[in-house]
Amino acid sequence: MNGIYEAARAKYAEYGVDTDAAIERLKKTEISLHCWQGDDVRGFESPDAVLSGGIMTTGNHPGRARNADELRADMAFAMSLLPGRQRVNLHAIYLESGGKKIGRDEISSEHFENWMRWAGELGVNLDFNTSMFSHPKANGYTLASYDKGIRDFWIEHGKRCRTIAAEMGRRQGGPCVINHWMIDGSKEPPVDRARRRALFVESMDEIISEKMPESQILDSIESKLFGIGMESFTAGSAELCLGYAMSRKIMLTYDMGHFHPTESVADKISSALLFVGKLLVHTSRGVRWDSDHVVVKGDDVDLLMQEIVRANALDRVYIALDFFDASIDRIAAWVIGARATQKALLTAMLEPYAMLLEEEMSGDTTWRLALADEQKCMPFGAVWDYFCETEGVPPGSRWIESVKSYGKNVTGKR
């Protein structure tokens, strides 16, 4: 054990914090890495895929993964630089069909066989997502479309995605979290909000109608405030999705970029957990809007992880990354975002919660404020570096040279 960590451990002990216990806790906390950062959300349906449905990625940094093998290699390399445990999060558009054109209402687990085999070899679990965007039949509305043919198409897609997720869960021996999010909304205020939302609910009910074991699959529904082309209305609002998750007894997804900039996602955690069994949280970073910037350590993600840890809810909350930035090295984006999320978790785990709570319950909030502010000067970095070293990954910024070398020798030659 190095002297710097020993000094940090002693300092935290003065506040009743066991840094060794925090590290062990962090080692067991999984972060789900999103595959779509590696190829700009293009997927493998078509070589000329175009993003639509309120989704936009900016930049043209060289080295984008062009096929599943390259994407898997890039993700494996990124994970080799991360401490702790990871999962891998897939969208339905990342199927492998051997060159055959497969409709989204025709996909099956065989199209993800390589992903499941690869994940098994790495010892990581998979998560899954329906892909109800960037498609000719996703023109404004999917599950809330007035056109029954459109609704039926996406309902079938949702059902097939659940079957795929359940197979992933069966194979990996633990639940695959499947996230349901769809673009449904309009640029201008609609007249008929009620019918749209009723159709949305009816369609979702049909998708999740088949009961599947929670040991294999966990359904989650994700809201959104607005998107490009649906600035005035979204069928899947925060209120609708919260009510749906509560009434259907499924998970609720909170994405850090899907709310008004003045809203705190952190403040929603303790409320939702009173009524919803489990949550999925997507760490992202909005700059003025839902712009999916790479997560960096800051107040927003720190507060989110504090609320999860304070609620003792790590066994009820799944944590995943959700951003896509093509203006910087894509592998570096994974590493920066994942490590920032883990740093926020460690910060929360190192909080002198017992002392803060004692001051709060005494009614003297002066000393609670003073103690909370003093913690900002604690030697967090020494604990983080020690955690990385014990996990066999580069501490501090030493990982940067590895990514630069990978860029020069691998992605830079694409």
Image: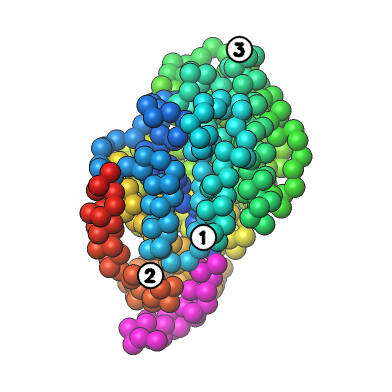
**Mark linked to residue 38:** none
Q: Which residue is mark 2?
A: 393
Q: Nearer the viewer, mark 1 or mark 3?
A: 1
Q: Classify the position of the N terminus by image quarter.
A: bottom left
Q: Say if 154 sits above or below 244 in the image.
A: above
Front residue of this view, candidates 171 and 287 = 171
Q: Does 20 lie within the magenta span?
A: yes
Q: Residues within 10 Å of mark 2 (few under 14, many from 20)?
A: some
Q: Which residue is mark 1?
A: 122
> Which amino acid, mark 2?
Val
Magenta stretch bounds = 1-28
> Which amino acid, mark 3?
Asp
CA separation, marks 2 and 3?
52 Å
> Which amino acid, mark 1?
Leu
Residue 209, quarter of picture: top right
Q: Nearer the viewer, mark 1 or mark 2?
A: 1
Q: Residue at x 72, y 38 (%)?
A: 248
Of the residues under marks 2 and 3, which one precedes in the sequence? Answer: 3
Front residue of this view, candidates 289 and 122 = 122
Residue 223, quarter of picture: top right
> Residue farthest to the right?
211
Disc 2, SS:
loop
Q: Residue at x 60, y 13 (%)?
A: 146
Q: Which residue is mark 3?
A: 147
Front residue of this view, candidates 114 and 293 = 114
Q: Say if 36 sits above or below 50 in the image.
A: below
Q: How is the image coloured?
A: rainbow
